[in-house]
Amino acid sequence: MKFLGRYIGSHKKVIIAFILFCFVFLIVFYFYDLPIMAVLYPIIICIFIGLTFFIYDFCRAYVKHKYLLIINSQIEYINDISLNTETQDDIDYKRIVFNLQERLKKLEGTMNSRYSDMMDYYTIWVHQIKTPIASIKLNLENNNSELSKLLSNDLFRIEQYVEMVLCYLRLNSESTDYIIKEYDLDTIIKSSVKKFASQFIHKKTKLNYCPINISVITDEKWLSFVFEQIISNALKYTQRGSISIYLENPKTLCISDTGIGIAKEDLPRIFEKGYTGYNGRSNKKASGIGLYLCKRICNNLGHTISVESCIDKGTTIKINFEQEILETE
């Protein structure tokens, strides 16, 4: 009905002209005093012919409309749009679409080239910055002073930020280096927790963890990044208390802390890119990228990640490893 209304609206000039011609026809026959049937008969024939052309043209326009709707719904998969160019308007519109496609291809090529250059630059930068970081780390390990321990913790955070940059670049690239197979979850957890041993000791934060003894289908490197981000956040926002790592059925890993918690109104948005929430803004420690990357990685790996939290009571991050179908190498 909407299309019919729009069609009539676009042809209203022709319809009005047809009605005016019929009216002129009646006036002429009236002035010549012709019999009423001699007037009505040609009018009925004209109306019949007009309706026939109207229905025919409406059906053709409707078919074209449905075809264009199909093209619009699949536009990203269509390289060439084939339309019947029966009118000059069709020819002009097709020429416009073609020119826009060509311009879009050129723009896409330019943007891909710029993005590739940017990726190359930051990838090189990340690998170059790791060299002085490793050198500083080695020098600090040879010094057992309190200052060196503080600097080591700061350096560790710098390493995390560098890894975050590299992870962000790889996630947005066309190719990834996933190695999906079955891993022992305890091995990945222990490796991730070990990196934060000095911070646990420095902050006097207790770790509650017992072996989970399950295997999961995942990628070790990317899942380790997720664990490290979650543990880092837990340590960052837990001034005193403990961090617990345990398993909930069915196959859900929980990483829980007794930190400052997350406001209820912030919970629906904490996985959005750049969103820090009230506590993140007040402490000026959050970038709004860590949990966003965790969400992206978990989605790519087929895991689900969720959060439960209460202000001044703590936060629990849950990762569900149940998967219906996932190919392994």
Image: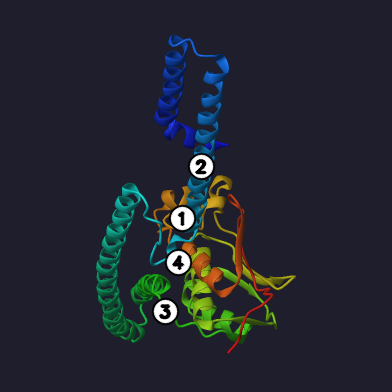
Q: CA distance from mark 3 to mark 1?
A: 28 Å
Can residue 3 be seen here? The reply is no
Q: Considering only order in the chain, which callout, 2 or 1, is on the residue closer to the N terminus? A: 2
* Residue 110 located left or right of residue 298: left
- Mark whose residue sits in front, 1 or 2: 2
Mark 2 residue type: Phe
- Mark whose residue sits in front, 4 or 2: 2
Q: Report if the CB atoms under discs 4 and 3 are less than 8 Å apart.
A: no
16, 100: nearer the viewer: 16
* Residue 295 located left or right of residue 212: left
Q: What residue is disc 4 on? A: 77
Q: How dense is the environment of label 1, judged by Cα within 10 Å: few (below 14), some, or many (20 and up)?
A: few
Q: Considering only order in the chain, which callout, 1 or 3, is on the residue closer to the N terminus? A: 1
Q: What residue is disc 1 on? A: 72
Q: How dense is the environment of label 3, judged by Cα within 10 Å: few (below 14), some, or many (20 and up)?
A: few
Mark number, residue 175:
3
Q: Percent position (x, y) of residue 4? A: 53, 37
135, 65: nearer the viewer: 65
Can residue 92 be seen here? The reply is yes
Q: Considering only order in the chain, which callout, 2 or 4, is on the residue closer to the N terminus? A: 2
Which of the image's four quarters has the N terminus?
top right
- Mark whose residue sits in front, 4 or 3: 4
